[in-house]
Amino acid sequence: MNDGPLWKGRFGSAPDATLLALTSSLSTDIALLPYDAAATKAHARALAAAGLLDEDAVEAVETELDRLVSEWERGELVPAPADEDVHSLVERELTRRLGEVGRRIHAGRSRNDLVATDLRLWCRDHARLTASDAAALVSTLSSLAAEHADTLMPGYTHLQRAQPVTLGFHLLAHAHALWRDVERFDAAAARAAEECPLGAGALAGSTLGIDPHIAAGILGFARPFANAMDAVADRDFALDLVYACCTCGLHLSRLAEEIVLWSSAEFAFLHLAEQWSTGSSMMPQKRNPDIAELVRARAGAGIGDLAALAAVFKGLPLAYDRDLQEDKAPVFAAVARTRGGLTGLRLALAAADFDATALAGAAGEGG
């Protein structure tokens, strides 16, 4: 069994426990486990094509990886103290379960090309999921716009009544902005799926004759890497996704701000459903638009995620640096926050009531 870090070979003593605690990323990158398993399966197939694994060994690896992912999904997978990251955990478990076959699976690859591959796969899938969430909110706004195509309301500049418009026209303005977000998420997914880093090794490939086209095809990438050094260092695709999340968060904050304003007694354009409002124990007459307020506030964290991720990459020498361990937390947080905001506002708006009388009355009063 592997009882130490993957890199322990040249060291005569074990690393300090505090060092291990400070450098471990497992609590964050465990989210990559299904992708690490998929990349390992693809690598096993590439090793087999190069004559380095037989079919029985490949099938055994695939079976254990499926079992490993299932155990993780059920909450039954227990990491060991020496598991620095998800890659260490997977390799240790394969070695424990399959012995020599498990040890051989790491031939011709590095954690550098493996983590780049895992993160690309995660970004590809979650960009697509976020695009779907954004499209769902666009659909809700479009349905409300069709319902209120003739509902008059004031249009604003400087938050002052400017010209009469319809509620449908106003809602579609938000829908158009969010549709651009759908396109950004689609573009981020495509960028993540462009090149497969698997086979790039630590920075310069390997001499084992492994064909990188095999893993790229299995994993659904457009092509294998063009330059091994760039492949392990590139995180542009992650920046693209977090930028898309940041921009979407800004659009959500504008929509959320109008929900807050319109649901106030001063505007009274919109009434949130009780299940999408909160109250006050001291002031029971109040119905608070907390979901909109939180979405509005969380746009700030999205800006922070983009700045944090860009700062990780700034000035890094080629090819891989441990700084890149810090890339996943802002990516994961940005996507989770954006998907939550998209879903929350979609459901709140779908259950809301617009007051056509109040809207038309305000339009008629003009400036």
Image (spheres, rainbow, N blue to C red):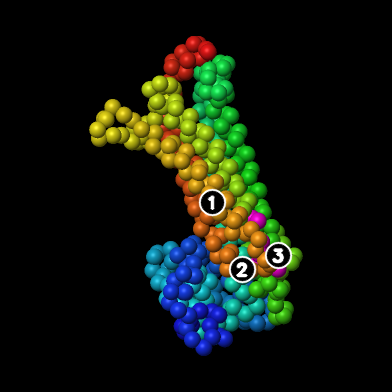
Residue at disc 3, secondary structure: helix
Q: Is residue 275 visible?
A: yes
Which span is picked out in magenta? 229-237
Dot label at residue 157: none
Identify which residue is drawn at 53% across, 71% down: 87
Residue at disc 1, secondary structure: helix
Separation of residues labelled 1 and 2 (CA atoms): 20 Å
User: How dense is the environment of label 3, judged by Cα within 10 Å: few (below 14), some, or many (20 and up)?
Assistant: some
Separation of residues labelled 3 and 2 (CA atoms): 13 Å
Asked if the residue at tag 2 contacts the one at tag 3, i.e. Cβ–Cβ closer than 8 Å, the answer is: no
Q: Nearer the viewer, mark 3 or mark 2?
A: 2
In the image, residue 126 lies at what x, y percent? 55, 53
Identify residue type, mark 3.
Asp
Q: Is residue 90 visible?
A: no
Separation of residues labelled 3 and 1 (CA atoms): 23 Å
In the image, residue 354 lies at what x, y percent? 44, 24
Whether residue 121 is situated above or below residue 337 in the rendered picture: below
Identify residue type, mark 2.
Asp
Query: Which residue appears farthest toward the bottom when viewing the image?
Result: 12
Main secondary structure type of the part rendered in magenta: helix
Pointer 2 residue: 321
In the image, residue 99 lies at what x, y percent? 51, 84
Q: Is residue 235 left or right of residue 265?
A: right
Pointer 3 residue: 230
Q: Is residue 118 left or right of residue 262?
A: right
Identify which residue is drawn at 47% across, 18% down: 359
Identify which residue is drawn at 36% across, 33% down: 288
In the image, residue 326 lies at what x, y percent? 54, 62
